[in-house]
């Protein structure tokens, strides 16, 4: 037995179980002086395999593990056993309440806490948690976005336990809450959340991918989309934050003049992490490890006060849940350290924005990455086929992928300061691009003989894992054995872009499978399965037809989708024009991008892959449009309020003070001239000219006048907006008029800030916010 002190609480190791003396584990915290062992605390707050073994009957444990593996449903008897076990674990940890933890269409998480407490008929208190309580809850759904799926008075909604994501305890200073990851459905069974379509897309993709792998005689039971999400964020001092209504209400600075030193020296990226920030990061990681979130990297990002955290790859559903928790933990721990986390995509004008780099790949249940190139014909064919499926999917549905990352906040980020542009394209790297070009245009491969594999019917180069460089301007880049979708916004749930990507690839793979069957027939497919062994593809006379078929499908797919491939500078004006010629989806604002959800081909994709119904698609379009409009309205109203209550009062006073100074100087000079005249001074004609000072005053006054005029125009446009009811019309006004007016007002205020004494400026400046001590 070994004791280690953590903030005066004793951590005891006994066999493989870790507990705190006298049930004090809810106070289990990091000790800044002594540190900790990650392995000791990893998944400490998760009902993982270790806890299930301990708190569930053996048969219940085995059955539950099998259900998780196969994605089956839990029956009522088993649910009762699991509920009892997880309740006992939670109570042993000082937990009094449970909550179905779900992800409504707000983009955040939600939870309704219920106590384990029940009162018997004789008045005796008892802790009770049934299988029925575990499987389903009925929160009021009336105040969550529904996009017209149901009326406001239709309040009932259901949260249903997602068995594929482990239950966990969310701690606070006074105890903890047992959280049950759940989906969220309406009374009629419509999805009202982010998780449900993601789970559906995973099922569809697994089915299609397994079918393809069976042709290669690999026969997996399941294929998983796996994701590694790099989360970028800003940190600002809490005291400065609460003195800026724009940050509090909208998440971004509506005003702010950049200081002379921003990110131009490139000295913050990967630089030494300041002690205050590092302490914050270590505390965040400590809490994440207890929740089983495998935080791997931390570092300074490009902009001052910008940072990144990235976990190890996980199944996309778990990764999505964990990313939501990462954002919650970042916010919570920041406040403890007198800091505030900004997750807005563009909190500071003129500096890098923040995104989520969504690194997406496919893995089977045997642990094989399907985008790992290999040296055998079997591995190369399989790799090229799956690579092609993604290229075709992104080409056909680049408009829908663009819509998936469209928000009012991401509009400010896309297209500048290292953020990818709004046009979706794929970067493959020099070697893969050369291979694709040779296949598409039937060119001869320019490689040495040792780098070529003979398939019996054609030759292709050996493809290594490190065959690509990186293109930071590309929104969708292949980076060795995964695709990096860099356009996802930092505040977004990753569920939407991933379920759309999953669905698109699933549909293409299903189509590839049908082509294989129609071209080969059952006899040839069965023969292929017999001669293959999963590690190498035997080149036999009868097997040449299979190779030919796969290569034909690859080449057909690449020829169809070649226009989505681009290796150059995605920021260049020439690319925008070229993308239009290629008939890619070229839009630079959310309202136009969201229309892609309504296109028949995109609805057909989501419906046929069983990811969303037509009602659910329409609802999401309406919710996203409403969110865009409300975001712009909130920003405009906040800007008007700040100008009226902070900027104008200070500007009026400073304007008066400037005039008074010039007036006093002029009077003093006039008095001096009179004295010199009386004394007969002949230099009187060389009096001082105050034209420069007076012009400075006039410039300031003109800015104030322009501010008043522009403010009045914005208020009129806001009044007009309130009279409109049509979503598309309101969104158009917000995008084309209100945002332009706000940009104009910002430019005026930023010029006033530049000309106003710093101690008088009513809000913390960029210097205050960006340079944390």
Image: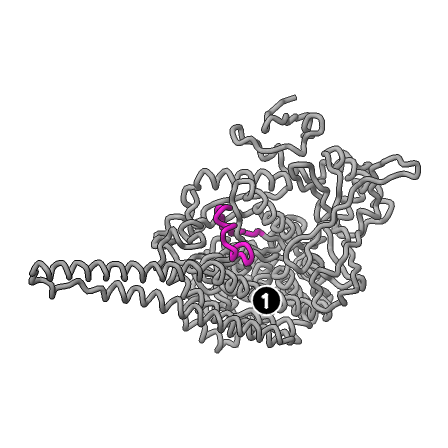
Residue sitting at 36 percent across and 62 percent down?
A: 655
Residue sitting at 59 percent across and 55 percent down?
A: 361
Residue 531, given in percent of the width and then of the height, sits at 67, 57
- Residue 514's quadrant in the figure? bottom right
Residue 245 is covered by the magenta coloring: yes
Q: Along the line of sight, which residue is nearer the eye, 323 or 228?
A: 323
Please say if 579 is above or below 482.
below
Please say if 152 is above or below 318.
below
Is residue 87 toward the left or the right of residue 624 in the image?
Answer: right
Residue 84 is covered by the magenta coloring: no
Q: What element does badge 1 sit on?
A: helix
Q: Along the line of sight, which residue is nearer the eye, 692 or 39?
A: 692
Q: Residues within 10 Å of mark 1 (few under 14, many from 20)?
A: many
Q: Which residues are magenta?
A: 228-251
Residue sitting at 44 percent across and 60 percent down?
A: 649
Q: Quadrant of the C terminus?
A: top left
The residue labelled by disc 1 is 628
**Colour setup of the view:** one colour
- Residue 706's quadrant in the figure? bottom left
Q: Residue furthest front?
A: 678
Q: Along the line of sight, which residue is nearer the eye, 304 or 194?
A: 304
Is residue 284 toward the left or the right of residue 135 in the image?
Answer: left
């Amino acid at each position: 037995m070994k004791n280690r002190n953590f903030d005066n609480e004793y951590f005891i190791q006994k066999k493989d179980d870790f507990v705190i003396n006298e049930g004090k584990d809810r106070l289990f915290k990091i000790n800044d002086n002594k540190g900790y062992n990650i392995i000791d605390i990893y998944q400490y707050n998760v009902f993982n395999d270790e806890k299930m073994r301990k708190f569930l009957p053996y048969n219940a444990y085995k059955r539950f593990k099998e259900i998780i593996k196969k994605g089956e449903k839990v029956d009522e008897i088993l649910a009762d056993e699991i509920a009892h076990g997880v309740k006992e674990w939670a109570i042993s940890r000082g937990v009094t309440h449970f909550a179905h933890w779900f992800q409504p269409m707000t983009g955040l998480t939600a939870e309704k806490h219920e106590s384990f407490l029940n009162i018997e008929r004789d008045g005796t208190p008892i802790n009770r948690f049934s299988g029925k309580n575990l499987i389903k809850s009925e929160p009021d759904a009336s105040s969550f976005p529904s996009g017209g799926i149901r009326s406001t008075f239709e309040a009932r909604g259901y949260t249903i336990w997602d068995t594929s994501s482990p239950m966990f305890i969310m701690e606070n200073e006074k105890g903890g809450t047992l959280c049950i990851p759940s989906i969220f459905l309406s009374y009629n069974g419509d999805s009202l959340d982010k998780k449900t379509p993601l789970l559906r897309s995973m099922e569809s993709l697994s089915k299609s991918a397994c079918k393809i792998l069976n042709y290669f005689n690999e026969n997996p039971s399941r294929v998983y989309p796996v994701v590694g999400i790099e989360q970028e964020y800003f940190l600002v001092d809490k005291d400065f934050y609460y003195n800026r209504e724009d940050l509090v209400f909208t998440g971004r600075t509506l005003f702010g003049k950049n200081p002379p030193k921003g990110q131009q020296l490139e000295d913050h990226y990967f630089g030494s992490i300041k002690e205050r920030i590092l302490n914050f990061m270590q505390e965040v990681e400590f809490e994440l490890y207890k929740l089983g979130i495998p935080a791997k990297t931390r570092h300074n990002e490009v902009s001052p006060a910008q940072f990144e955290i990235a976990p190890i790859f996980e199944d996309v559903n778990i990764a999505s849940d964990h990313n939501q928790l990462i954002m919650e933990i970042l916010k919570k721990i920041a406040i403890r350290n007198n800091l505030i986390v900004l997750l807005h995509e563009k909190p500071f004008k003129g500096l890098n924005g923040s995104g989520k780099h969504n690194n997406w790949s496919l893995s089977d249940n045997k642990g094989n990455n399907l985008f790992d190139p290999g040296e055998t014909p079997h591995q190369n064919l399989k790799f090229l086929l799956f690579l092609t499926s993604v290229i075709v999917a992104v080409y056909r549905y680049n408009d829908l992928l663009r819509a998936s990352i469209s928000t009012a906040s991401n509009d400010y980020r896309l297209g500048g300061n290292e953020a990818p542009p709004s046009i979706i394209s794929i970067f493959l790297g020099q070697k893969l691009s050369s291979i694709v070009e040779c296949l598409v245009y039937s060119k001869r491969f320019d490689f040495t003989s040792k780098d070529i594999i003979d398939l019996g019917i054609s030759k292709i180069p050996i493809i290594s894992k490190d065959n690509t460089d990186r293109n930071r301007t590309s929104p969708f880049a292949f980076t060795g054995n995964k695709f990096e979708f860099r356009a996802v916004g930092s505040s977004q749930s990753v569920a939407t872009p991933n379920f759309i990507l999953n669905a698109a690839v699933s549909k293409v793979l299903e189509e590839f499978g049908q082509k294989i069957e129609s071209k080969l027939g059952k006899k040839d497919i069965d023969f292929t399965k017999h001669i293959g062994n999963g590690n190498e593809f035997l080149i036999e006379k009868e097997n040449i037809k299979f190779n030919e078929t796969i290569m034909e499908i690859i080449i057909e797919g690449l020829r169809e989708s070649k226009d989505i491939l681009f290796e150059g500078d995605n920021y260049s004006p020439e690319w925008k024009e070229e993308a239009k010629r290629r008939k890619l989806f070229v839009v630079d604002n959310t309202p136009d991008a969201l229309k892609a959800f309504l296109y028949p081909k995109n609805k057909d994709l989501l419906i046929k892959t069983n990811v969303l119904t037509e009602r659910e698609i329409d609802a999401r379009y309406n919710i996203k449009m409403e969110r865009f409009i409300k975001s712009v309205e909130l920003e405009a109203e906040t800007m008007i309020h700040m100008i009226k209550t902070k900027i104008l009062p200070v500007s009026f006073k400073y304007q008066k003070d400037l005039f008074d100074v010039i007036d006093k100087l002029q009077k003093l000079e006039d008095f001096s001239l009179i004295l010199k005249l009386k004394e007969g001074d002949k230099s009187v004609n060389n009096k001082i000219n105050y034209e420069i000072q007076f012009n400075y005053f006039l410039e300031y006054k003109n800015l104030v006048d322009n501010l008043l005029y522009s403010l009045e125009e914005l208020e009129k446009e806001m009044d007009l907006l309130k009279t409109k009811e049509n979503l598309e019309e309101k969104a158009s006004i917000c995008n084309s008029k209100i945002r332009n007016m706000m940009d104009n007002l910002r430019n005026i205020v930023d010029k006033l800030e530049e000309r106003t004494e710093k101690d008088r400026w009513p809000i913390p400046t960029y210097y205050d916010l960006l340079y944390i001590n």
